[in-house]
Structure formats: structure tokens, C-alpha cells
């Protein structure tokens, strides 16, 4: 009997991948491999181009988070020229970034991660999308989501010069400031965003936390991995998306390391497996011990959940309240249940909205002093920001004219490749027993990595297309088994 | 009839950027008597839908990964495609263009009833480059011609053009 299991395509996941599951003689999972084909040549493509082009070029790597690449590349370009942008330039960059974060986190929750909970993981796949959500919860939700996105795009355009692929950040700062009129408009939108984020958390509270079955699902072992947690922190160890030092805590929540962006190579190494092009970053000073949980394994995650775990709290008052409730509800820090990432993402949404209002009401925000002219000879620079889906590192080497000679990028999702591989493996093991493939396998596997909001388009230097992901199951003799198709 | 033509794709990823190149050509060939808005985007799903608000008709131009001969030009309607993965029209970060349009309409947004797609067939390669492969490059002027013809008429059937020479 020939059986192959296929998800083709996973319509709510960026990227093109293939999961192959091999069974043993008893029909249980022996091994599973989550493979991703890699785009080639980005490092080669940028060699010979001016460093000033990187913020514009790199935001074309990924259609989902151009703003994250724009910021990381801009900060790396500042570092290449050893120039410190004026305070107002940093405020404006961060303000743009908060608006982007609100848009991105909102979209993920309502369109990608949320439907599994709002509709239920057992609902027909055709209903588990944003349309299902508005049919169930109400039309006004759709309006709010579209409104949030509109405000986010508007702010990105005002500060960044373009709606989607911003172009205003350059080495030494930004190309333009904002007027008092624009400031007022951005402030009003920010206040609305704070309310919207609170509304979203209330919705999560009512629909998910009010439902014991969902809470059990979140707390279930299938979606739990005890790994290290990474996140960018300010000087008080509070989560910051735009700037700070990278802090990593161990599986028990104790600080393992805190490093400045330019030290990343001392702490992060990349493991290569023969069955995939994408590398697996790990903590160099722990070492690669395979796809294992625990303190002795160098696997870490970089997600909304890991950022909360790695921090001592949120820097804004309302988000801090929810942060405390989060850990009180889920049994203290750190939380390792991956599905809790959806809740963590909403707490970050609230933080980003509050921070938006903080930044736009800063007295310096309308100052015309937005650029410091670079005067140093360019050499080498590293920029790190938190992309919504994980810590994003850009590293460029240039000659004395500022022409790029070498580049290295570690993008958000790549950090999580090992945890995603572990999560999908665990889901497969729990749902394939004695040769019987549980009908829920496909969705369980999807839910496992949907929590990470993976953008393999980005991680493999791909783009916002829709590509198939396939699950193939082989018996102990390597014969392929059954085909199932699922369209969300 | 208010019309928008959108080139979709990534201009730094070889053949994937063909939609943008076709748009450049369309701009050269367009005569001022054809009222149309033109954009190049790297978006799908909700983001793409948001750009279509206010239009009666949309024409999307994009690379199309299929087993047809490289450089073939496909002309189809969005409704001809299954509602999941129409190359760039979907964004896996949120939803398909069809779902996004339905969402937008249910919010009361005015969205095109008619969405045409011009797909230029490519063996999608994953290499960064700003140039097109020869068969795809050869198809650009023909695809531009198709866009301009479409602007002047409404097609209701799927046709396939084979670039000559």
C-alpha cells in the first residue's frame, strides 16, 4: 500500500518547504526532516554595491518585513561609518518601526495565528482564516484590522517616504523630519492603536483563556520545548524592538549572556545539516548537541515569547500589566509552551502602540536635526533589530569607499529553524502511532510552526509568494505512504 | 471604468521581477487617451487588496511558475485560479487575494469586480539578479501588448500567447 501525506500548499505560511517523516518497523516516527530550499547569492548580489544602498536593497528580500531589514541595514550602515545619528533620527526610526510592528502583529493574529483559536483547531480549514473570524466574532473586527493596517501604513509612509518599502533611513540618520501637523495626526493614530491592542487582548481573554480546551491545548506537551530564549533589551532589561543589547536566558530563566550587536559572532554559530540548505544558528558557548531541549543544548528561540522570557518586563505600563498576568496565568517565568507565543505577540502589540504614543509625544520628535554627516572612513558594521519574528542581524564589510565587500545576514526565522524542526517532529510523533496517521496531523504540524510566524521566504532569501509545503511519510523500508491534501 | 495595472514581483530576483519590467514597457507604449493608474508592488493578500480599493477593474502582471514553456504568456481571471496560491497574489503572512477581496467588500470597500492576471511563465529560479532569462525577457514586449489590448477590451476567456522568435 502506498501512502503519501502532503500539504500543498500551506496557505498561511511563507516559504517553500518539505517535511519528510520516516517511520520505524512499528509504524512510529523514527525521524522527521523539515527542509527548506534556499535562495542563493544574496551575499554575492550585494558585493560591489555602496553600503548606502543596503537599506533599500535588503528591504526587497522579504515582502513581509521590509521595515525590519530597512532598520537593521540602516543601523549597520551607521556602524560602517562609525556615525551616531541625532536623537530625533533615532526616535523617528523607532516610531516608524512601532507602526510597522502594530501592523504586522495585528495581521498575524487576526489572519494567521488567531483563526485556529477563534474558529477552533478542528474547524474546517476553509473557515480557518480571517473571513471565518469576522463571520464568527463580528464584522466590526474586520474593520478594525483594516483600520490598524491603514494607520500603520500611513505612519510608515509619512516617516519612511513610501508605504511599504521605506527609503528614508540613511547612514547617520534620516532624510527628513515630521511637521507638528503630522505629529498630531500620528499621535491620534497611536492612541487608537493602544485601544485596539487592548481590545485584541480582551478578545484573546474571552475566546481563548475563557475556554478550558484551548488553555489545555496551549499548555499541552506537544507544543512545549525547554530552550534558551533570546531578545533585544534596553538598559533596564525591558523589551526593545529597535535598539539595545541581545540578552539570552537559559531554560530556567536565568541570564546566560548579554552582548552588544558587534559581539554577535562570539556567541552565535551556525550548524549545517546535510539535508537542508538553511543553517541552524545555535549558542556557540553551549555548543550544538542536536535537536534537543535543555540547558546543555545550544538551541534557542527568538520570538515574541522568547523576548518576554528574556526580559525583566515591558517598558510601558499597560503592556507591563499584561506581562504580569501572562506569567501569573501560565505558571511563572519562563514559559516554554510555544502556543503562548500568540498571547505574547498581543502583549507586544500593546507595547508597540504605547511606545508609539510615547515617541510621538517626545519634545524632540519634530526637531529638524535628523542627520549627522558621516566623516569617518567606512570599514565594517553590524546592525541588530528585533523583527516581529525574531532577532535580525545585518553585518557588512566595506572597502574605504564604502563599497560592500562581504555581507552576512541572520534573519528572524532562521534563529528558529531548529525549534521549528523540533516542534514539527514532536507533533508528528504524537499523531502518528503504530502506522496510523491521525487526521489531525497536518493541522497539528501547521499549528506547531505557525506560532513562530515563520517567514522562510525571508530566511531563505525568498519573497512573498505562496509556495507548497509537502509532508511525505515513508515506511521503514523507505516506501512512501498515503496522500492527503489540505487547502486553508 | 477606473482601472489599475499592477506589476507584481521582486525586482532583484531574476525572472521574478518580470511583472515590473512589463509595466515599464506598458508605460512606454501607453497613449494618453487610455486612463489608467499603474503601480509596481511586492505584495500579496491584504496588502495587495488595499491597493485595489476604489477601482472597477484590475490587471495584475506577474511571473507564473508552471510547466508551460518558459516565456509563455497566460491571460486569465482571478476567478479561474483556485483560492489558495496564485503566485504573488497571495501572502502567506495573511490570506489569499480572493479572501482579502471578500474581506474588503464586506467592510464596504469598493473593489474591482474584475481582476485579470497576465502570467509570464518561468522556471522560477532562486537566484538574486536584476536580469531576466532570455525567453522571459523576450516575452516582455508581448506581455505589454497584451496588457494594452486588455485595457482596451474585456476578455472573458483564457488565451495563451506564444512569443515569436
Image (cartoon, coloured by chain):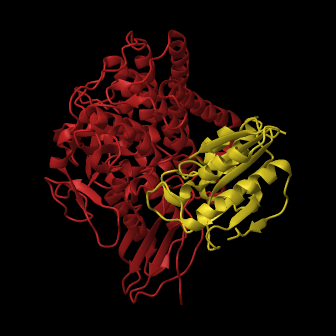
Chain colours: A red, B yellow
Q: How far from the left and from the top, in percent, is residue A127?
A: 66, 54
Residue placed furthest toward the front: B165
Q: How many numbered circles does the render carry? A: 0
In the image, taking residue B45 as reference, residue A177 lies left or right, namely left
Q: Is residue A429 above or below residue A228?
A: below
Left or right: B18 in relation to A321: right
Q: Quadrant of residue A92?
A: top left
Screen quadrant of the N terminus of chain A:
bottom right
Q: Residue at x 65, y 41 (%)?
A: B39
Question: Residue drawn at (48%, 52%), measured in percent from left and top?
Answer: B12
Relative height, residue B92 to residue A480 (above, below): above
Where does the image place residue A281, in percent across and percent down from the top left? 26, 56
- Quadrant placement of the C terminus of chain A: bottom right
Question: Taking A440 as reference, is A372 left or right?
Answer: left
| Residue at 25% from the left image edge and 59% from the top image edge | A293
Residue drawn 18% across and 39% down?
A259
Visible residue check, residue A269: yes
How far across and how far down the image is residue A235, in percent?
22, 26
Q: Is residue A99 above or below residue B51?
A: above
Residue A21, placed above or below residue A342: below
Mark yes or no: residue A416 visible.
Answer: no
Where residue A365 appears, as percent x and y from the top left, is: 41, 14
Amino acid at each position: 500500500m502506498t501512502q503519501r501525506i502532503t500539504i500543498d500548499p500551506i496557505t498561511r505560511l511563507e516559504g517553500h518547504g518539505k517535511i519528510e517523516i520516516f517511520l520505524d518497523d512499528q509504524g512510529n516516527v523514527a525521524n522527521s526532516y523539515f527542509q527548506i530550499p534556499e535562495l542563493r547569492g544574496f551575499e554575492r548580489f550585494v558585493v560591489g554595491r555602496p553600503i548606502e544602498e543596503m537599506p533599500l536593497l535588503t528591504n526587497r528580500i522579504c515582502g513581509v518585513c521590509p521595515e525590519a531589514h530597512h532598520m537593521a541595514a540602516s543601523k549597520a550602515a551607521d556602524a560602517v561609518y562609525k556615525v551616531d545619528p541625532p536623537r530625533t533620527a533615532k526616535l523617528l526610526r523607532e516610531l516608524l518601526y512601532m507602526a510597522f510592528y502594530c501592523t504586522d502583529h495585528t495581521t498575524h493574529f487576526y489572519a494567521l495565528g488567531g483563526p485556529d483559536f477563534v474558529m477552533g483547531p478542528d474547524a474546517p480549514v476553509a473557515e480557518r482564516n480571517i473571513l471565518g473570524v469576522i463571520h464568527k466574532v463580528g464584522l466590526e473586527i474586520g474593520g478594525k484590522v483594516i483600520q490598524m493596517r491603514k494607520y500603520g501604513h500611513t505612519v510608515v509612509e509619512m516617516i519612511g517616504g513610501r508605504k511599504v518599502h521605506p527609503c528614508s533611513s540613511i547612514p547617520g540618520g534620516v532624510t527628513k523630519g515630521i511637521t507638528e501637523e503630522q505629529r498630531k495626526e500620528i499621535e491620534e493614530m497611536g492612541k487608537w492603536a493602544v485601544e485596539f491592542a487592548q481590545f485584541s487582548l480582551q478578545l484573546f481573554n474571552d475566546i481563548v483563556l475563557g475556554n478550558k480546551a484551548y488553555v489545555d491545548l496551549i499548555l499541552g506537551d506537544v507544543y512545549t520545548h525547554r530552550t534558551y530564549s533570546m531578545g533585544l533589551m534596553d538598559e533596564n532589561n525591558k523589551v526593545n524592538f529597535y535598539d539595545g543589547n541581545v540578552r539570552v536566558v537559559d531554560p530556567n530563566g536565568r541570564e546566560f549572556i548579554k552582548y552588544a550587536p558587534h559581539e554577535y559572532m562570539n556567541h552565535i554559530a551556525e550548524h549545517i545539516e546535510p539535508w537542508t540548505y538553511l543553517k541552524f544558528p545555535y549558542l556557540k558557548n553551549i555548543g550544538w548537541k542536536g535537536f534537543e531541549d535543555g540547558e546543555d543544548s545550544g538551541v534557542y528561540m527568538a520570538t515574541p515569547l522568547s523576548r518576554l522570557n528574556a526580559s525583566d518586563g515591558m517598558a510601558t505600563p499597560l503592556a507591563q500589566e499584561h506581562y504580569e498576568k501572562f506569567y501569573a496565568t501560565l505558571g511563572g517565568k519562563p514559559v516554554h509552551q510555544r502556543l503562548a507565543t500568540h498571547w505574547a505577540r498581543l502583549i507586544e502589540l500593546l507595547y508597540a502602540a504605547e511606545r508609539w504614543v510615547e515617541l510621538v509625544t517626545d519634545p524632540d520628535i519634530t526637531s529638524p536635526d535628523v542627520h549627522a554627516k558621516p566623516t569617518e572612513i567606512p570599514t565594517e558594521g553590524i546592525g541588530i533589530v528585533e523583527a516581529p519574528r525574531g532577532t535580525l542581524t545585518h553585518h557588512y564589510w566595506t572597502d574605504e569607499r564604502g563599497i560592500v565587500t562581504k555581507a552576512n545576514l541572520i534573519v528572524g526565522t532562521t534563529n528558529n529553524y531548529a525549534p521549528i524542526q523540533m516542534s514539527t517532529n514532536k507533533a508528528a510523533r504524537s499523531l502518528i502511532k503504530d502506522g496510523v496517521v491521525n487526521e489531525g496531523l497536518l493541522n497539528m504540524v501547521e499549528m506547531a510552526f505557525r506560532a513562530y510566524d515563520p517567514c522562510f521566504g525571508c530566511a531563505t532569501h525568498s519573497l512573498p509568494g505562496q509556495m507548497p509545503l509537502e509532508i511525505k511519510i515513508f515506511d521503514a523500508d523507505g516506501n512512501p505512504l498515503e496522500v492527503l491534501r489540505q487547502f486553508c | 471604468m477606473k482601472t489599475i495595472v499592477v506589476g507584481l514581483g521582486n525586482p532583484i530576483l531574476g525572472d521574478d521581477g518580470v511583472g515590473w519590467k512589463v509595466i515599464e514597457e506598458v508605460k512606454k507604449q501607453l497613449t494618453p487617451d487610455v486612463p489608467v493608474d499603474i503601480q509596481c508592488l511586492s505584495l500579496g493578500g491584504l496588502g495587495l487588496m488595499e491597493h485595489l480599493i476604489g477601482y472597477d477593474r484590475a490587471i495584475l502582471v506577474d511571473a507564473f511558475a508552471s510547466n508551460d514553456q518558459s516565456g509563455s504568456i497566460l491571460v486569465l481571471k482571478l476567478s479561474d485560479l483556485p483560492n489558495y496560491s496564485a503566485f504573488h497574489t497571495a501572502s502567506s503572512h495573511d490570506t489569499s487575494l480572493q479572501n482579502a477581496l471578500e474581506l474588503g467588500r464586506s467592510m464596504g470597500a469598493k473593489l474591482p469586480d474584475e481582476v485579470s492576471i497576465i502570467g509570464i511563465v518561468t522556471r522560477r529560479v532562486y537566484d538574486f539578479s536584476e536580469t531576466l532569462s532570455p525567453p522571459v525577457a523576450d516575452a516582455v514586449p508581448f506581455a505589454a501588448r497584451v496588457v494594452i489590448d486588455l485595457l482596451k477590451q474585456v476578455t472573458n476567456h483564457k488565451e495563451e500567447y506564444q512569443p515569436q522568435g
